[in-house]
Amino acid sequence: MSKPARPFHPTIATANALRSGAVVFRAPDGSWSRDLAAAAIAATPDAAATLLAEAMRDQDACKIVDPVLVEIQLDGAVIRPGSLREAIRAAGPTIAIPTDARA
Amino acid sequence: MYRYDEFDHGFVRARIAEFRDQVARRLSGELTEDEFKPLRLMNGVYLQLHAYMLRIAIPYGMLSSRQLRKLAHIGRAYDRDYGHFTTRQNLQFNWIKLEDMPAILDELAAVEMHAIQTSGNCIRNVTADHFAGAAADEVADPRPYAEILRQWSSLHPEFSFLPRKFKLAVTGAPNDRAAIQVHDIGLEVKRNEAGALGFAVWVGGGQGRTPMIAKKLRDFLPEKDLLAYCETILRVYNLEGRRDNKYKARIKILVHEMGEAKITQAVEAEFAQLSGTSLTLPAADVARIAAYFAPPDFATLPAISDSYEAAKRNDRAFARFAARNVHPHKIPGYGIVTISLKPIGAPPGDASAAQMEAIADLAERYSFDEIRVSHEQNLVLAHVRLDDVPAVHAGLERAGLATPNAGLVTDIIACPGMDYCSLATARSIPIAQRLSERFADLDRQHDVGDLKIKISGCINACGHHHVGHIGILGVDRRGEEFYQLTLGGSGDENCSIGEIVGRGFSSAKIVDAVETVVETYLGVRTSPAETFLQAYRRVGEAPFRDSLYVRADAD
Amino acid sequence: MALFRCGRIDVDDWVFPADDTQIPTAGRVAVPKARFLAERHALLQRPDALGLILVAGDGLDDIAPDLPRLGLIAIRFPRYTDGRPYSLARLLRDRHRFKGELRATGNVLRDQVTFMLRAGFDALDVTHEGTLFALREGRIVTVSDHYQPASREDSERHPGGRAWLRRSAGRSLA
């Protein structure tokens, strides 16, 4: 007897910008934004497949690199990263970055 | 140190032109990412969590002050004012833009540096003893051979598409500070009974998913056969190494699966054909390369420096720095100074651009213009007059670089982990920071003594945790960061892989667990002179397993 | 698809019959290793030149004695990241002194051309459009200074200094 399929979670498409390497998210208008809040949400498996296909086309068009779908959590209307890794990608390292301030 | 001649300059210029062309073709779409990826990896450009990461080659860890200042400049101009020194003696910048890469490479070329082959399935940076040319126990300087291997392996047409990455390390001392037994090829420079120079050759060591200690294929390979023998090993690996499974593709797996006898036979059969050919190293060429590493103009000094001794008497902080961060030098009156990049509570191995410049100034003034990077993520000023150590210390203090913890429990080695790296399964830097803070008290650190903690944020083991006296591996357990503990590893000439002693620990509990391990050691040691590693090898895992799991469970 | 040799696009004068097709009685024919070993005697009787198609994992020991009688060896790169053909090429040139045409086929891309030529290949069977274009237009940026001897000791020279250095004679796509 097979395990029940894991329930579908809302996903967004994320990638790195080709030229700068910055973390970006695919917005509903097809642009790629550095702001997680601007991401288009795929609420069904079909929508997710479409979103990924569009992201792959954007890779072919040399806008972005390595597009993937990642799960998110919806806190009302607020998008939250679905994993620690995505939280770090969205917000940066969890540690203080060295600065030139001292010395 | 090695100086480029016209040939070397021309090579790097041609390579930059080639890569500039490749970047342009990528940005225009002529090259797909799949086609571009191996090319950018061969030029040290990774795509990481936040941005492209550039790994700059620091050949066998050697830098001049001019080069270190250029790195500081690049950090400021193209990155976020800091860099990270790695466990392979390289430097990483974490916020690089692909479109800036050609310009950065031009800047590096101006100071005889590059990022060639710091990534990809090719031969990587050849690392060497960071005390080379200075340590009292050195039989012969490993750096000329590391330089020859570096040249020979650069854009080698036969070995640029290996089954997987390939790492070489060279030591010239019986005390192995280069961890040669956990490298794909490890070389120990030595002399035979007749006094001739040659190498013990170890093959098939490595960490990662399946840590293995190398097998010694040759006890003494004559100097002239160095390139022919390495070419042989690479050829056997290139042809026979597994290409079906990325996690079984290193030469260590081939050595393990063929067995020592069969791999020796295969290597020796091919070597019989290659020895005596155009790869033979002429002694005159070795001597010419070695001349670049000739000892600097040491002054004739008494072994004891009165001012150094006085400074230790009068300044407790300086005395503590001298006790840990100054190693004996083969020349009387000199010392090897370690600059710890592990300030309490800071990410291990990072240096700001301003700190790099401060170190460059100190090196230029006090250490014949040389800086070394160790595979334990610290920097070394190898030739400092003991008379000058107080001034060096004062300069380091001003730059926030005088942490007197070399080799102590807070001198932690950690990979960048999930804060930076797209391969990571857990964060490593915050664990290092919390451990560092837990053990911050210097009296306590001295009581604990020599203890190497090494932390990796994933199974690829870039933090070298398998050879940590205490090793920590960060994994993902059902979406949570979880940390496995290993004990008793060592990368030196008595190489051992750390042992898992029980189940792992949550992020909240791992620092307590390490403290339990340390306290257990303090309880079982015969005296303060018995180090953690010695005690562990004497008593085994039982007392540690007991305190971590049996007694803990009973509480 | 095009064959690049002697510095230009060339006409392919070799035939590569499918495994289930009969070998023509005349003309230059190349077959995979398995077929060669199975039909060796008949193949070697043919008056015209014979060629061999190798794949990345093939060994050379069982065909070594016949190599002098072959006019062509084509080695297939299943993926450009599979570096085994480079070692095979070098062994064929250096160890077995193979003097015939050594052709790279399969996933042949412009950024590996210099490596292929140095390893001993002297012909490239190219299907990738960008690579074809680059070859036709002379756009391949050939790096001519090298840090190791390879399998071009006849055309690369020692530029002086360290014994392991080599320099290609300009555009070495000949």
Image (tube, grey):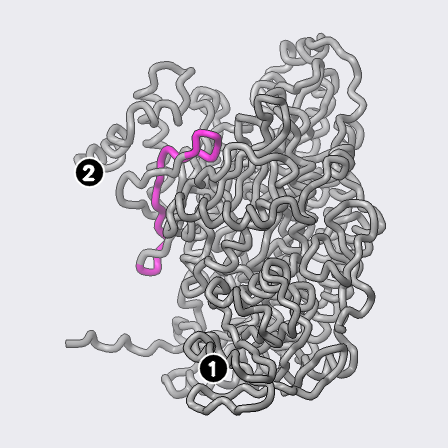
Query: Label 1: which residue?
Result: C42
- At label 1, which amino acid type do we have? Ala
Of C6 and B482, which appears nearest the observer? Answer: C6
Please name the residue shown 75% across and 51% down the image: C165
Please name the residue shown 54% across and 28% down the image: B405
Query: Label 2: which residue?
Result: B553
**Residue B245 in the image: above or below residue B272:** below
**Where does the image place residue B42, in percent across and percent down from the top left?**
63, 60
**Where does the image place residue C2, in percent across and percent down from the top left?**
66, 86
Give the chain of mark 2.
B
Give the chain of mark 1.
C
User: Of the residues tagged 1 and 2, which is closer to the observer?
Assistant: 1
Corner quadrant of residue A84: bottom left
**Where does the image place residue B293, in percent across and percent down from the top left?**
74, 33
Please name the residue shown 47% across and 82% down the image: C42
**Residue B176 in the image: above or below residue B127:** above
Please tell me whether residue B482 belongs to the stretch shown in magenta: yes
Image quarter of the C terminus of chain A: top right
Please tell me whether residue B550 belongs to the stretch shown in magenta: no
- At label 2, which amino acid type do we have? Asp
Of B449 and C28, which appears nearest the observer? Answer: C28
Please name the residue shown 50% across and 69% down the image: C56
Range covered by the magenta-colored residues = B478-495
**Residue B31 in the image: above or below residue B546:** below
Image quarter of the N terminus of chain A: bottom left
Q: Which mark is residue B515?
A: none
Q: Residues within 10 Å of mark 2 (few under 14, many from 20)?
A: few
Work out whether disc 1 and disc 2 sit on a shared chain.
Answer: no
